[in-house]
Image (cartoon, grey):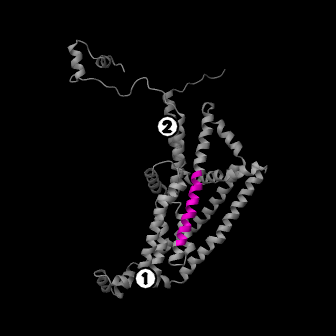
Amino acid sequence: MSAKKLVVSTYLQYILIAIGALLLFTFLRQIGGVLLTFLLAAVLAYVLNPLVRRLEAWRVPRVVAVLGVFVALVAAVLVALLLLIIPAVSQVQALIQNPEVLTDGVARLSDWTRELPYVGERIEAVDQTAITQFVQSNAPSAGQVFNGALGFIGGVFGVFGTILNLLLMLIVSIYLLLDRERISAAALRTVPATIRDQSVELFHAVEGTLVKYLKAQLLLCAIMGAIGWAIAYFTFGSYALLIGLWVGVTEIIPVLGAFLGAVPAVLIALFSGGLDAGILVALLFLLAQQLEGNVLVPRIMGSSVGVHPLWVLFATLAATALYGIVGAVFAVPIVAIIAAVLRYLRGTLLFERWQKAPVMEVATEGDPKVAASGASGEEPASLRSAARGEG
């Protein structure tokens, strides 16, 4: 004889759902790094999936197509390292090994500040002994040096962790592309049959929006990197490749990227060419930012995000406050995905009318309608329904 069935009341179900949602949210916050790795892998798989489909249309087996696409990707990254990163690193080393540029720039700026009416007198009043005493009083202690060494060791291990996460991202993205059909079928089986077709349409809408945004962002980074290289090359000449690469990378960060990309170029021009060169480079980058904001972004990005710039700014600042630079990078793609979901749901969902209005209008004694009905000897319908407790 089997035991009787137990019925779980709806109130207890609501409580269990709320507790489960809270526990799920706490768990997701604890594994944020793992989720970020899988998110990057999914984005990479989305970007490379059209190439895999193109190869499959040419009757190339899916395994060969996926492996070929990733081999081409790794080769492209290696070529970029050889052509861009290594010369940029050599330029940084040249800047470190030849500090005369910095010292000459500091001396030039110091001479310029001495010529100012009030500031120059203050600078002349500061003698070498005072500077030496200030440096000695603010010298780091042994404990601070030890903490700095520990921080450097932790940074080294952080580099190895980053490399490991990149390898895991590649492995997960390869797995997603190889078993895309089975993963999609398994995910669809978890969706109720009533909304299965709409879920597929929503997935394709989000995928299209994400791919469109990524293509536009990469093109914008390439154009702004080329503009940064041209400004550095035709003004102070040296370290142009390094400046262009830096400007292209920082363009990924919305709002703040344009400012961060211009800072090194302005400083190098200031130290190497003086105040006039620094002002010239700053003005050229300001013009480049105006070109980006008024011409390039509207034409290239277009409607890939589909939200007001103020929402993008709010999302960027909020994500930066919560997750730092990583949050700033992923703020706009997440906003684009949310906007795509809301646009699809707005065109798909139909809300049933409420049988009873949530807010009803009740006439008072001073209302002219009440006076008119009182003169006719009738009680207003709104007062009668309110007295009976009807909607």
Quadrant of the snapshot with the N terminus:
top right
Whether residue 193 is in magenta: the answer is no
In space, the residues marked 1 and 2 are separated at their CA atoms by 61 Å
Q: Is residue 343 visible?
A: yes
User: Element at badge 1?
Assistant: helix
Mark 1, other Cα within 10 Å: few <14 / some 14–19 / many ≥20: some
In the image, taking residue 80 as reference, residue 105 lies left or right, namely: left
Tell me where the magenta segment starts and ends, as one range.
Answer: 212-230
Residue at position x 75%, y 52% in the image: 55
Principal secondary structure, stretch drawn in magenta: helix
Residue at position x 49%, y 83% in the image: 101
Numbered mark located on residue 106 in the image: 1
N-terminal of the two: label 1 or label 2? 2
**Which quadrant of the structure image shows residue 167?**
bottom right
Question: How many marks overall?
Answer: 2
Q: Do tag 1 and tag 2 residues touch (Cβ < 8 Å)?
A: no
**Which quadrant of the structure image shows residue 203?**
top right
Q: Is residue 110 above or below residue 230?
A: below
Q: Is residue 77 above or below residue 27?
A: below
Quadrant of the snapshot with the C terminus:
top left
Residue corresponding to mark 2: 18
Residue 309, position as x, y percentages in the image = 45, 52
Kind of residue at disc 1: Val
Residue at position x 34%, y 26% in the image: 360
Q: Is residue 143 visible?
A: no
Residue 210, position as x, y percentages in the image = 58, 50
Residue 179, position as x, y percentages in the image = 71, 46
User: Element at badge 2?
Assistant: helix
Kind of residue at disc 2: Ala
